[in-house]
Image (cartoon, coloured by chain):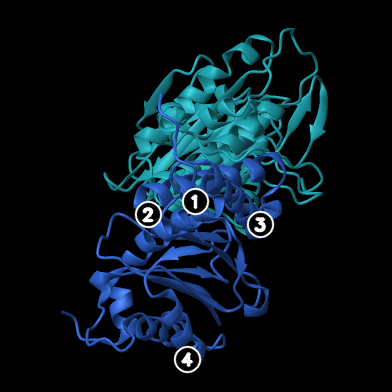
Chain colours: A cyan, B blue
Amino acid sequence: MTFPLFSPGDDPGPSFAALLTRVGMDPPVPTHAVEGVTHGTTVVAVRYADGVLMAGDRRATSGNLIAHRAMEKVFPADRYSGVAIAGAAGPAMEMVKLFQLQLEHYEKVEGTHLSLEGKANQLAQMVRSHLPAAMQGMVVVPLFAGYDLRRGAGRLFQYDVTGGRYEETGFATTGSGSLHAGTVIKLGYREGLDRATVIDLAINALFQAADEDSATGGPDLVRGIYPTMATITIDGFTPLTEAEVAEHFRALVDRLSTPESTSTSGAAPTMGDDQS
Amino acid sequence: MSMPFYVPPEQVMKDRAEFARKNIARGRPLVAGSFAGGILLCAENSSGILHKVSEIYDRIAFAGVGRYSEFDSLRIAGIRAADLKGYSYSREDVDARSLSNQYAQILNNVFTHEMKPMEVEILVAEVGAAPAQDEIFRIPYDGSVVDEPMFSALGGEAEAIAERLGSTWNVEADLATALRAAVAALIGTEDRTLGPAELEVAVLERSNGRRAFRRLEDDEVQSLLGQPAS
């Protein structure tokens, strides 16, 4: 590896992606469709009083098979922002890794943070440059959320496969279970929810998505695998502990298992063996 | 075209070294050293924006004295080299020693082949789990690498400052003690004071999580120095 010292005329600037291109370490673009790629699914982001909550299920599928049970889909992008991914797992993880590096690289080279708007645009460019791979079956559609220190508010963005960037005021979902998860959040969403309520809402959304979509994983009480969740507030990106998520899940399961719900037509979604 | 006069190589090297040394010595000095909580980097710098000390990677910091544009381009190249290495291998594989060697190659190459040597002296520091595992490398304009145990001084009057540090520096000291020792060494026998406005202070903290580098704001420097607010 040669030492990356460039003359002022062809300096790649503070962009790590441009640096990779400059040193010939660009990822290759697939020329044929790729079959049987591992996919990760349903992630959600919801604004609430203190900032934004991000949550994702843990399942990765490969066709009709479950490829991983404990995949992480919610990541810190930097101290005040997070990214959640759905789509082809390999390229998605690579995109997150590059995005994290991109933000840190900019911060170190320039000596200052990118604005939240700038970070969201960076991710849009990365999704857009991924389009050729998406056309070959490796679609990656992320969610981006962060705490905007200049505005003093949480903000969230969703993307489409062409790199379109859409800021949402309330919530956003992506992945195969996003239709169901989105509906649940839509019904329960109000402006300025408190932390506990928004966690319950996101957990309910993921639970209902898992109930309707085979590619979305529900809580795995046997192995103790629960969705990954994180809050992004003025204190930065903070993952929720597994114990806290588990507790909210048990509350949901208890609520859904009451006689009132089981007496209606069709069994309520329960966790199996704890049905009395 | 006229024939250039013959100049013996010894004379060329001597002239270049003298040119670089003279210009570096004009700059304000900088000290770095291990203390109990990490590595302290303290520079005389009246600008709050043009930094002499900065972050390279998780546990690695960079400091430079001399011509700003030259050491800043070296700083950016170092960040690029470290980020590229961490990206293609792993974050643990990025180390100060290999980075220092790369810097040395560049400086040596410029010193012997270019019209003008770089008028810089740089420092690469990597914080370890304990002061004994800290690494501090000083790389002067000619691309030699000096492995400095415990502490190092760069820039104008570096030798005198290093001598003063030698008699006061203690790797078991806390941050406040280390900073006071560093500032005292910078001042030396001169009749002047150095306040937060004239200092640029940063630490590589052993217990700061993944990214060890942290800049100290003026308020914190003030309280560590124990001086009344100006």
Q: Position of residue B210 (x, y in %)?
A: 58, 59
Closer to us: mark 3 or mark 4? Answer: 4
Left or right of residue A128, residue A91 in this image:
right
Residue type of the residue flagged with mark 3? Asp
Q: Please name whichever residue, A66 or A186, is drawn nearer the observer in this view of the structure.
A: A66
- Measured Cα–Cα span from mark 1 to mark 4: 39 Å
| Dot 1 crowding, Cα within 10 Å, few <14, some 14–19, many 20+ | few
- Measured Cα–Cα span from mark 3 to mark 2: 33 Å
Q: Position of residue A10 (x, y in %)?
A: 45, 27
Label 4 sits on a secondary structure element that is: helix
* Residue B133 shows in this picture: yes
Label 1 resides on the chain identified as B
Label 3 resides on the chain identified as B
Residue type of the residue flagged with mark 4? Thr
Q: Give the quarter of the figure containing the N terminus of chain A.
A: top right
Label 4 resides on the chain identified as B
Q: Are marks 4 and 2 in contact (CB under 8 Å)?
A: no
* Residue A264 shows in this picture: no
Is A10 rendered above or below residue B203? Answer: above
Q: Residue at x 35, y 59 (%)?
A: B23
Residue type of the residue flagged with mark 1? Val
Task: Report which residue position mark 4 lands on.
Answer: B168
Task: Report which residue position mark 2 lands on.
Answer: A234
Extreme residue toward the left, this view: B230
> Same chain for marks 3 and 4?
yes
Task: Report which residue position mark 3 lands on.
Answer: B95
- Measured Cα–Cα span from mark 2 to mark 1: 58 Å
Label 2 sits on a secondary structure element that is: loop
Residue type of the residue flagged with mark 2? Ile
- Measured Cα–Cα span from mark 3 to mark 1: 34 Å
Closer to us: mark 2 or mark 1? Answer: 1
| Dot 2 crowding, Cα within 10 Å, few <14, some 14–19, many 20+ | some
